[in-house]
Image: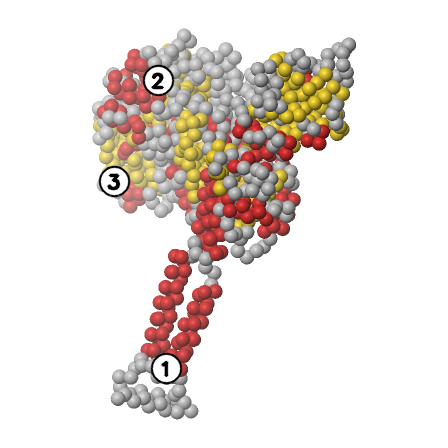
Amino acid sequence: MRTFYLLRDEKANISMDFLTAVAVIIIAFVFAVSVLSSIITPYSGYSKELYPTADRAVTLLVEDEGYWESDDGEGTDWEFKWNYSGNYDYSNVTKIGFLDSKETNTLDPGKISTIMEDQGSWWEYPVPSSSNPELDNASRAMGLGRYNFYIQIRPLNESKYNVSAANQRATEMVGDRGDVASVVRYSRMNLLDLGDFDGANLFGHQGPFKPLFGLDNDNFSYILSNGGLEFIVTNWSIIPGPGPSPEISDISIGIGLNPEHEITPTYNLQNNEFEIYKNGNLTTLKVPVLDKNDTIKIFIPIDSINKIENWESADFFYIMLDVRSLDVSQFGTTLFSSTSKIERYSLKTTVWVW
Amino acid sequence: MKNTNNITNNETAQMMTIEAFLGALLIITAVLFVVSQAPSGVQQADAQSKTQLVHYGEDTIDLLKNSPPPLDKPDYDNKLQYYLSENKFDDLNEFLNDTLPDNVAYNVELYDGGRYFPIIRNGYPSGNGISFNEIIVTKRSPAGGVGHLTGTSITYKSFDNGSLIIPMDEKQNNNITAYNLILKISNLGIPVYQLLQDPRGNESAGFMNWSLPILTSTDPWNGSDEPDTRPYAGGPYVIDVADLTSILKNQIRGWAENPIEVPSSKIDMIEFNSSMEGKNIHITFTLNNGSTKIINLTAGTPNITSVDGLDSLNDSEYLHIDTTSVAYDDLNKSKIIGIVIFNQASFDLTISNITVESVGKKLSSITINGTNYPATQNKVKIDGGLTLAHDSPSEKVIIHNSSEEIKYSHTTWLTGSPRIAVYPEAGTMTNYFSDSGISYTVLDSNNIVNGNLGNYDILIVPHTEMIEDSLSDVIVVRNMIDWVSDGGVLLAECASIKEIDDRVEDVDQDNHTWHGFIGVQEYFNTSNTIQLVGRSPYGDTLGKYLTDNLTGNDGARLHPLAQSYTEDGTLPGTNGTVSAFRLNITGFNPKNSIMAVPQNESSGVAYPKITFIEAPFDKGTVIYLAGHDQSTFSQQRERLIFNSILYSTTAKVYSYGLLEIRITMWYK
């Protein structure tokens, strides 16, 4: 049997060999921990998942068209299925993406405006007014699940928007939180800008004259991005008297035409379902147009457009004016695309996740 | 009290107390705690930043490809094609600068299938740079041209304070040796820029861009000189400070201050009273300490040896005669041209006299460094001796340092160091080598038949009368045409010019509507001064623009080939059988640039006689320079040779092309 003899004042003393052995073990242990740590660090733990999550989300937003599916079908035009019924029903949208189409490789302003809040040429989401059901579903469809997030889309040209306001909002929404991942992507967006119609060169139904305006399906995102359809007519061609006083007496909408270029079936808008301005002043039908230079602006909000079932799937969305003593120069449809021009934006999309 | 540990045998390294266990556990626990608290996101952050950088790069290229061109340039498919086709590199720089965040730096290079050359440089990537490449079809291309050559790539460029300037006027010790340094710098892989100027007159006569005032110091290495505003003429070269590191700067300083490859002196010409062909010649150089160096040669052959004389003392061992640089005048067998002398001692050497002996022949004179010494009894005594200075300040290449930002709208740059071939024999090229130290490769017909031209940027056919025989081989001519057509630069001098055009016409008569490469019809012999000519900016007649000329271009104005600094736009004439030529007015290359013509007797222009002309030929360039040995009379005249050499790698513009753009990004 081995016996240890301890002398006075030698308690707790250890040999140098033991100390060396412990030091070696500690160094080896620390090395192993550091190696393991560096290997497993990128994608382990909540904070370490933030960056790949943000990267995946922003990549989906700018590189994917999005997707919806239901018993009625499926498609990439999810913007028309987002809260389609108006009853917080977002369940059909499985993926949110802002890409217009992979061919054009540009973002769709309609898709952006469907979920993002337009703050004057820059967009953000969520905003304080975002409902919880919408936020939950947006989070789900963007792949952000359990994470908090904030998204901004800005033009790269800083002269096109209020930079300080956008910066302020980012600061308010994200602040200086500890673990925040942000990813930036650049994209392009083509924004349709409708020009004024020349009243002396309108197409429509003749006998009686009914100016007919048509927006083609490719430009339906304009309705979403602008919350409706707005257009202006000037330089009217007034049919000289005798006859009824020139006026706009009725506005109807629809998605089909008969051979005479009249909308069928038609939906006559009531005064509370649109806005009409004469020379900048809000008014109601019937609107006299006594001067050829009278400027008439008509705005039909998307809620009114939604009165037409499945309008988003139609080839055209039509607006027809019932007029008196105002000329239609040619038989046919006055296309919005005939006056529109495309404004091209370079955009910066930033997603913060925490 | 002394503490004594009594440890019995075999008890070393054994645990002594339970406290040791507790201590070790405590340490391990502490370490674990520290490790757990240590920042763990280093690698993660690195991976994240790289991912973000990849997004920046790919998205930026996508933006460029998807952005429309300017409204007034609807022919272009997108903004990237517009930028590269129109050389709008500053606009591209602005786009990138506006797009990328402030903490991201970038360089942009273009790859033409042969070389990368930079168009935007903001420094060197700090180890974590990521490159993004994209193939672009350009309407007009600064490189990689698939279409035909349309001219030099000239663009606006700014250089920050601290950039290096290599003067190419009277502020430079030796304009020719400066080219040696320029080629060396270009070989480092950093761009060498040139500020193109108008060499046809002077500032007071209304020539814009004749010189450029820049605030500079003359000591770029120690900064000891007070900056002063100096006018720079003759097309100075500039090294952008953004491309310089301390290592590169030291390398450039070493080359500039120690031009060891540059000869100490040169015998321009040894002239006899009659033809020396086949004769044995012995040339003895006697130094002032009595030692001698003897050159034995047989005229017209490569048999040349250099030996120390019997009475040699130490000094002659340091006198190095470059036997490879001895050349004969092909048109005048009574002349030896170009013997290059180096001082390899660590002190000055002095040659007191030179004796030339050849049985039955008489030495007339020797011309050394432009001074003619008449011979007496086959001996030339050099009054005061010919000093070969060791480490002479006058041999150093002058470099200045900009003390302000340089902004210049007519900047071009070298895409690389030219690879030089000479055919069919060195001829006067030996003189150009001896003046500059710039080496070359002599090709024979077999080399050209075997396709060796593809390894070179410029082919020089010096003053030689052998060209007609050499070009009798159709394959040689065919390969030469194809090589030029594909982008090569051909420089032909003197007697070879018309023969080349005639043979090209024989072999390739259906390819182009004009005669040969350019369309030379007739030779003239004149020793008159030559006048640089060209179109003036506002269509006036400054610079003797030839209103009825056969050229559609600006001639010498802002042309890299014509950069020189005489104040009246004149250069010395060189006599010889072919010192001017005339174009065939019914069949000449319509895109030619006539850059110099002989003066007439009243100092007007003797046009349609022409001395110096260039013309694009498909993707390549053909340069014809009439006159005898360009090195004999003036550095500014000899510069036309080196301008041509450097022109072979000067950035060009093509009608359209296929380019690869490479954007390298990194975090600042």
* Residue B306: x %, y % from top left: 25, 36
Give the structural element (helix, strand or loop) at label 1. Answer: loop
Q: Of marks 3 and 2, which one's residue comes earlier in the chain?
A: 3
Residue B389 in sight from this viewpoint: no
Q: The residue under label 2 is which amino acid type? A: Ile
Residue at 52% across / 25% down in the picture?
A: B198
Q: Are marks 2 and 1 in contact (CB under 8 Å)?
A: no
Query: Which of B293 and A24 lies nearest the eye of the viewer?
Result: A24
Quarter of the figure that contains the N terminus of chain A: bottom left
| C-alpha gap between disc 3 and disc 1 | 83 Å
Q: Quadrant of residue B406?
A: top right
Left/right placement of residue B336 relative to residue A48 reads left
Left/right placement of residue B408 relative to residue B508 reads right
Q: Where is mark 3, residue-wise?
A: B308
Q: Where is mark 1, residue-wise?
A: A14
Indicate which label's residue lies in the foreground, 3 or 2: 2
Left/right placement of residue B162 relative to residue B473 reads right
Residue at 54% across / 42% down in the picture?
A: A90
Say above or below: B123 vs B574: below
Packing grade of label 1 (10 A; few <14, some 14-19, many >=20) is many
Q: The residue under label 3 is which amino acid type? A: Asp
Residue at 74% across / 21% down in the picture?
A: A294
Q: Chain of mark 1?
A: A
Give the structural element (helix, strand or loop) at label 2. Answer: helix
| C-alpha gap between disc 2 and disc 1 | 96 Å
Residue at 47% across / 63% down in the picture?
A: B38
Say above or below: B27 vs B358: below
| C-alpha gap between disc 3 and disc 2 | 42 Å
* Residue B591: x %, y % from top left: 44, 17
